[in-house]
């Protein structure tokens, strides 16, 4: 294959190579008929195939395809295997519809719950998001269809998305924002990575050499091609030089001409263009190997899969007095427009034309056997207040055994192209919740929305709440199955639900000003922040109830102490102590007891979703590798393991740690000391080699310090008092008493620290 590609590249003219790296239209690469090179066809993505009926048009109506739950719902499944299955189904639909590569999944981190595109993103934690996204990519690509991981990187808000400069410190970038891409790039090898619209630390992502070449290719070994987000390229030649292979959409003849001219004038090395052409040809040939188009979608099977996924995504947030599941014989008041006009996806490039749509009200009727089910809209379209509808609904609720109240984030308030102004639904819906709860103690609130929603104002008033996300076209069926206990809820939050917007970590640093947004919270996003500042939240990361209960016991570690390179095995027993089959998400967090740099109180490093029959016990095992204990040290530009004690915390959520053990890790990494002439005494003392060398110096220097035998201890006192000064500055205090200038002493000490031979001054 490689030889074939190299040969093809040699046959391409300069103009053909320039044409290859820009779209022929909105969705396809430029074919080169002379050499029989077809185009590669792309389509959004991510939770369904949006294949435009009119090929090449940017906004034509799309062909019907299964609308799966959106990513925030997928995140809440915590189920790798299920996402792999979904990936297979997505790829089968791509094949049927003639799509070579799906533009997704997206794995930007949920820095703020206000981000309009959070519904398209998985989690506030890079490990969770990375694992799920990797499974989805593996599923898609197992069928010979490409996946495109997006939007690389730090596309965490829609506000000013085409221009904003995200100022992120190196450590937060590595540990949070890039980590979300690193794992799936390495483990799932997506065909493509899509760059984001925004800038990161000064450069547009589309022409960010550090991100596109040094990190993505050189460090992570990415072998696919990098594509621009649609319209994200500013300077085509600079983008190519930085490592951006394909510009979309096309055609843009002036851009092609600019590339040709740059090569001719010597500003762009033709080897760069050759490498780009080779990467694109590899994907094009790979795609051509699987025949596509003209097939039928497995509508029923994929609808059933979409329902199963939605059933694992819905999170039972509250269930007082075990109000749920319903028995089926209750007289039910179904209230809220979204029970009849489901809100199951959002707006923007991800919008799918569904093959069919489950209506919650109909699905409830199917499961409620003969029981009486009545409906009231409760509020006007968009969640607006309407006195008549409001009164009617309250009256209906009062006369029923149970009220199922459907509320939603108003469409238009969230979506691609704009952030949410706040976390609220609408005033009318909140009033309705209160009014219904006043007359009906058995009220269940079902919330549809793509991200965390504020509930503090009303949640006390109702006994049960389901977070149903944007659950895709089969969401209505999944909601009904959960309400009636056909499915036992097993979703857990992949994002913290805060009490108030002003509690959120990015509150003071969002959405930025003068074109810049400063990620002032650093790596403390999501639960890392709430844990660190001990702030109460509405519902923590990892939280979700079930109709059964699980016990955790017998936590075992493979060894009390281990080397970083060997990693650690964690195992425990989980028992279903309730009376229904169910699934539990067991979460493993790691806490570094002490580190040279500040670390979050705990970080998710492993999880397993386990299915248990009533009374059944299973042993679950989770492996933690060196990365689970590492942090990224900007001083060394590297991931560091630091010897010491680590707590292994096993929990049912970030706030519900059930078992705990401690293990000692020995780092096998050898790093040169970071000490320089600018280091403070405190830093010398904290550095093992530096401390020893400093000690040796003290013994020798004592003779020069006035006070005879007391010299050494008086020098020690000097150092104590001056520990936040640099060593040369402190030595200067002693000044004239020393036989040589302080700089010479420091140079001599540093030589010892860094291992150079020199025993006497
Ligand atoms: C979005 C991408 C999408 C592309 C093509 C862009 O506006 O940010 O996620 O894949 O359009 O529709």
Image (cartoon, rainbow, N blue to C red):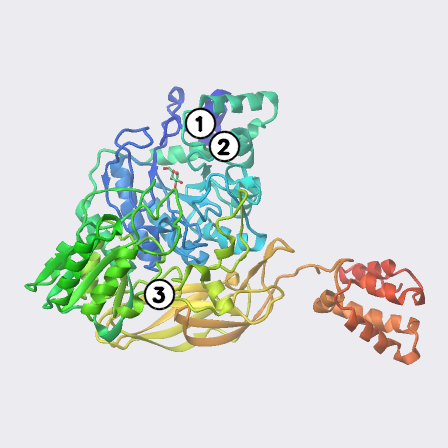
Question: Decide: marks 1, 2 in contact (CB < 8 A)?
Answer: yes
Residue 456, disc:
3
On the image, the x and y values in percent for residue 496 come to 40, 62
Residue 20, disc:
1
Q: Earlier in the sequence, mark 2 or mark 3?
A: 2
Q: Which corner quadrant of the image does residue 262 belong to? A: top right
Mark 2 → mark 3, Cα distance in angstroms: 52 Å
Q: Foreground residue, 84 or 202?
A: 202
Quadrant containing ligand 1 reads top left
Mark 1 → mark 2, Cα distance in angstroms: 9 Å
Q: Which residue is mark 2?
A: 276
Q: Residue at x 55, y 21 (%)?
A: 261
Q: Is mark 1 within 8 Å of ligand 1?
A: no
Q: Earlier in the sequence, mark 1 or mark 2?
A: 1
Q: Residue at x 23, y 70 (%)?
A: 581
In the image, farthest residue toward the bottom: 709
Q: Foreground residue, 86 or 8?
A: 86
Q: Which corner quadrant of the image does residue 289 belong to? A: top left
Judged left or right of residue 711, residue 659 is left
Circle 3 Cα neighbour tier, 10 Å, few/some/many (<14 / 14–19 / ≥20): some
- Residue 486 in view here: no
On screen, residue 479 above or below 464: above
Q: Earlier in the sequence, mark 1 or mark 3?
A: 1
On the image, the x and y values in percent for residue 667 come to 60, 66
On the image, the x and y values in percent for residue 674 come to 70, 59
Q: Secondary structure at mark 3?
A: loop
Judged left or right of residue 175, residue 587 is left
The C terminus: image quadrant: bottom right
Residue 187, disc:
none
Q: Secondary structure at mark 2?
A: helix
């Amino acid at each position: 294959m490689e030889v074939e590609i190299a040969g093809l590249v040699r046959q391409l003219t300069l103009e053909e190579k320039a044409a290859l790296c820009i779209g022929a239209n909105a969705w396809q690469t430029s074919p080169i008929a002379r050499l029989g090179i077809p185009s590669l066809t792309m389509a959004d993505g991510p939770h369904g195939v949006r294949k435009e009926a009119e090929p090449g048009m940017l906004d034509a109506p799309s062909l019907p395809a299964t609308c799966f739950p959106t990513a925030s719902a997928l995140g809440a499944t915590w189920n790798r295997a299920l996402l792999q299955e979904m990936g297979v189904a997505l790829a089968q639909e791509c094949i049927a519809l003639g799509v070579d590569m799906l533009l997704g999944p997206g794995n930007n981190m949920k820095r703020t719950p206000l981000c309009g595109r959070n519904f398209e993103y998985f989690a506030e934690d890079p490990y969770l998001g990375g694992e799920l996204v990797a499974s989805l990519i593996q599923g898609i690509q197992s069928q010979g269809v490409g996946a495109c991981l997006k939007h690389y990187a730090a596309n965490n808000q829609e506000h000013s998305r085409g221009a904003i400069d995200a100022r992120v410190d190196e450590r937060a970038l590595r540990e949070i924002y890039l980590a979300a891409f690193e794992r799936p790039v390495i483990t799932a090898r997506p065909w493509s990575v899509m760059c984001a619209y925004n800038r990161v630390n000064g450069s547009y992502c589309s022409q960010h050499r550090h991100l596109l070449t040094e990190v993505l290719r050189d460090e992570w070994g990415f072998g696919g091609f990098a594509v621009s987000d649609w319209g994200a390229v500013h300077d085509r030649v600079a983008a190519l030089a930085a490592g951006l292979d394909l510009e979309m959409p096309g055609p843009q003849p002036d851009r092609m001409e600019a590339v040709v001219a740059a090569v001719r004038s010597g500003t762009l090395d033709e080897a760069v263009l050759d490498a780009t052409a080779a990467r694109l040809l590899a994907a094009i040939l790979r795609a051509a190997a699987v025949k596509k188009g003209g097939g039928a979608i497995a509508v029923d099977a994929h609808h059933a899969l979409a329902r199963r996924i939605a059933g694992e995504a819905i999170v039972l947030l509250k269930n007082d007095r075990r109000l749920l599941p319903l028995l089926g014989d209750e007289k039910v008041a179904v209230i809220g427009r979204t029970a009849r006009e489901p809100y199951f996806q959002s707006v923007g490039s991800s919008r799918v034309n569904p093959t069919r749509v489950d209506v919650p009200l109909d699905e409830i009727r199917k499961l409620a056997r003969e029981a009486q089910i009545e409906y009231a809209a409760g509020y006007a379209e968009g969640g607006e207040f309407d006195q008549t509808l409001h009164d009617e609904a309250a009256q209906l609720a009062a006369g029923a055994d149970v009220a199922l109240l459907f509320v939603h984030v108003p469409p238009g308030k969230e979506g691609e192209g704009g952030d949410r102004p706040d976390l609220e639904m609408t005033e009318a819906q909140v009033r309705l919740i209160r009014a219904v709860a006043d007359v009906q103690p058995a009220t269940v609130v079902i919330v549809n929305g793509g991200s965390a929603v504020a509930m503090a104002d009303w949640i006390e008033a109702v006994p049960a709440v389901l977070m149903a996300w944007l659950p895709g076209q089969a969401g209505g069926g999944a909601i009904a199955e959960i309400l009636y206990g056909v499915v036992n809820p097993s979703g857990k939050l992949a994002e913290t639900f805060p009490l108030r917007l002003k509690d959120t970590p990015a509150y003071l640093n969002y959405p930025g000003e003068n074109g810049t947004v400063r990620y002032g919270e650093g790596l403390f996003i999501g639960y890392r922040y709430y844990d660190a500042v001990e702030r109460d939240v509405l519902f923590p990361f990892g939280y979700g109830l079930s109709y059964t209960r699980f016990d955790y016991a017998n936590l075992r570690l493979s060894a009390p102490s281990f080397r970083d390179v060997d990693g650690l095995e964690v195992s425990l027993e989980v028992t279903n102590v309730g009376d229904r089959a169910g699934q539990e998400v067991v979460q493993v967090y790691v806490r570094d007891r002490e580190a040279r740099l500040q670390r979050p109180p705990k970080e998710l490093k492993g999880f397993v979703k386990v299915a248990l029959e009533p009374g059944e016990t299973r042993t679950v095992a989770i492996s933690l590798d060196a990365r689970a204990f590492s942090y990224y040290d900007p001083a060394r530009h590297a991931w560091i393991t630091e010897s010491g004690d680590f707590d292994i915390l096993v929990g049912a959520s970030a706030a519900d740690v059930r078992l705990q053990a401690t293990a000692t890790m020995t780092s096998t990494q050898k790093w040169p000391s970071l000490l320089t002439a600018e280091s403070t005494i405190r830093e010398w003392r904290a550095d093992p080699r530096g401390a020893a060398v400093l000690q040796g110096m003290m013994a020798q220097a004592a003779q020069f310090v006035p006070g005879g035998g007391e010299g050494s201890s008086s020098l020690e006192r000097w150092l104590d008092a001056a520990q936040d000064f640099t060593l040369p500055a402190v030595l200067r205090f002693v000044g004239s008493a020393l036989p040589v200038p302080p700089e010479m002493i420091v140079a001599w000490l540093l030589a010892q620290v860094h291992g150079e031979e020199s025993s006497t001054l």
